Image: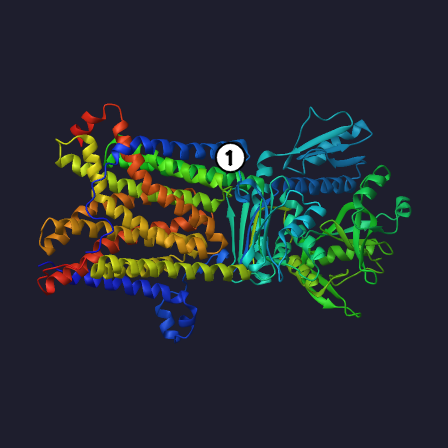
Amino acid sequence: MKKVGGRIALLGAVVLLSLAFFIPSYSGLYGSLPDWLKRVFPNKGITLGLDLQGGIHLVLEVEEDRAVEIAVERNAVAMQDLLVEKKIPAESVKRTGPTQVTIAFQNGDLKAQIQKAMEEFPTFYEIEKVGTANSVVVELRDGEGKRIKDSAINQALETIRNRIDQFGVAEPLIQRQGLKQIVVQLPGVKDPKRAKDLIKNTALLEFKMLDEEHKLTMELPQRIPRGKEAEVLEQFKSKLPEGDEILFEKHLDKDTNQEFRFPYVVKKRVMLTGDVLSDARVSIGQFNDPYVSVTFDSKGAREFERITGENIKKRMAIVLDNSVYSAPVIQDRIAGGRAQITGSFTMQEANDLAIVLRAGALPAPLKILQDLTVGPSLGRDSIEKGIRSTLFAGAIVILFMVVYYRLSGVIADFALALNLICLIGALAGLNATLTLPGIAGIILTIGMGVDSNVLIFERIREELRLGRPVRLAVDGGYDKALLTIIDSHVTTLITGLALFLFGTGPIKGFAVTLCLGIAINLFTALVGTKVVFDVLNQRRKVEELSI
Amino acid sequence: MLEILGKTNIDFMGKRYLAFVFSGILVLLGCLSIWSIVRGTANLGIDFAGGTAVQLKFAQQVRIDDARRVLQANGLEQAELQEFAEENKILVRVKAATTIEEKVADRVVAIFNKEFPINRPEVNSSTEIGPTVGRKLQQDALIAISISFAGIILYIAARFQFRFGVAAAIATFHDVLAVMGLFYVMNKEITLLIVTALLTLAGYSLTDTVVVFDRIRENLRTRRRDAIETVINNGINQVLSRTIVTSLTVVLVLIPLTIAGGEVLHDFSLALLWGVIIGTYSSIFVASPLLLLWPGSKGALFRRG
């Protein structure tokens, strides 16, 4: 007599465990449970993939070379400030290469003084052989460039996370992939375009002074149609004074619904950036037009007060991502650390602007490498179809097995059910994400599960044909089929593992279900059905096996 | 006892030359498909080639010619269109060349909104993949395939003999090539999902081959005096009903998926369906005869089997 008690207990335990893991995935049932019972179950189950519930999957790359350039440019401005402060009359301080700054001067005697001043920038070193009698060339140190790139990605990650948090998405996934890529997954997002804009906007807020003294300001056209910006830039490039740039303000003519651009001559020098903001909120103006009011932190407030005090009656441009939002005339010294960003916003635009300003600027622009967006309706569609055809396929297989193998077919179907329960339980236990290819993997597992049973049954039939008694035939069949089953499962498992390790996205989802399925298959085919046969054999002496 | 096949005694090995011709044609098609991928003329999905795909759902039916005309008039000549008749859905694909920064997806939607103001589409899904990602995915897929093949040959060589491993690998390769060839002839798109299907059918075909080989090996031990063709034929005949029953159940699973699984699963299931049929054929008519082709095979099989 073989002992079956232990194996039955094992099977029972596995099934119960699987069900326990699965229950949180079935929100209808889980939600109705009393709290104390909820605590018994794990609190997370299977997550549906983007293809099943809709959403966005983005792969972004931080333009890290730009991050370095931006940092070098900022340093160039700081160098110029320092030279002004030390009363060294340099002609120009400009970034002349990705990591180079050239300081040019008329009087050759200044060289030593400038070299001395540059010692205050320890992250730069002088390249003497490039410099001339009238210029000093400094370059960013390699290690510093690497540090900037690295922190750019971390900062971008942090910023995106903050923005998404404030936007409000259930279970977003935001993580670094490889050296310079960021993966963002937002399941179930209703308005994908808005979410993408929110992530991608650099949101670099800058306060710059207009250059009103230069005659170019008078020559520029009042307003130009949208799309003509490049032409204007080309036309006035030669007349643009050193240290100035032309920026545009978007304007929507509400009567004709046409978009225009107002050009401005703006001094390149940044007076203040969004770094010093402590808060940004949407407010409603007197004409019911939304605007964003920002609050500076204490350092920013002091700076802002000083800058406005020094520039009374001049115009200051509020620039976001290189486009001017407004350019008010400073009426008076502004204390208290508050400013308003007006523009022709809709309520939603103002809201999103407030979010990105609160979350902070990205250190460099982002490039979208991959963008998968699945609308919620397609998701619903494919889950319905996937499940319906899976159920249908399952029903056909179950029926076929019963017709072909009769009672033994029922046992095989029992193994199949066991298989599915364990597989779903295991997926839930691992908090796996179920995708469409994952469902395909489950179906393939069903096929393999059937195959194991077919192998065993055909062997048992062979043994029976040779005239063996039922019990010996069953044992013989299992023994002889065992090696074949192991061989076939291991080879498929090798494929599955290779897919899991080296595949990406949908391939990985498929590989997870396949590998789990194969492991569970081995268990149910070799332990699950065998127990049933052994029990049958134990109860009474079986003369004839229904197979 | 219900049986599809009783005890059979078919001379499979005798028909091997016919099978080699048939397989030769399939493999040739597969090679054409590979060649077209190498030359860059293959119908690669945007996940490999890079580009944009937008699936739109219209309230009323839109003729695909109208849709194409509208896109062409607005400067998207290179767009490829595909329609899903039953639900007024149209899939617009614009491959590589255009970069992701151009926001092709938004452009497509804007064009349709402008041209069909009363029948505006709803965006079902949109996919944009930069060309660098496409190359990365291609590489990843190639690595995954190579590694799984190497692993499989090693495992079978260890469990059986080296020649069984090589024969199984060739047969598996044959199946993958054959399905690629069929897809090439049908001008079906090769996407990441299709590569997944190819790998799955490789696994399936391998399982099938292993089952047959297992039986041949078993027979080699017990019946040393029979001619090698007879031993192989016997092995195949003994597992034939299992082979047919298993393939039949998998085919039964795949048919509803191909027909009703929705557009995403359709090509995937189709590839698997072809794969199962060819995989079953190949373990009998390709893998097993290959054992005979091995130089000096007769002696070696008997000595070590």
Q: Chain of mark 1?
A: B
Image location of residue B136, percent across then percent down: 51, 39
Q: Nearer the viewer, residue A256 or A366?
A: A256
Q: Nearer the viewer, residue A44 or B296?
A: B296
Relative to residue A69, is residue B248 drawn left or right?
left
Q: Residue at x 61, y 34 (%)?
A: A141
Can residue A171 be seen? no
- The relative height of residue A60 versus residue A38 in the rendered view (above or below) is above
**What amino acid type should be assigned to the residue bearing mark 1?**
Ile
Q: Residue at x 66, y 38 (%)?
A: A121
Location of residue A297 by image quarter? bottom right
Q: Mark 1 sits on what residue?
A: B37
Q: How is the image coloured?
A: rainbow
Relative to residue A354, is residue A393 drawn left or right?
left
Location of residue A542 by image quarter? bottom left
Q: Quadrant of the C terminus of chain B?
A: top left
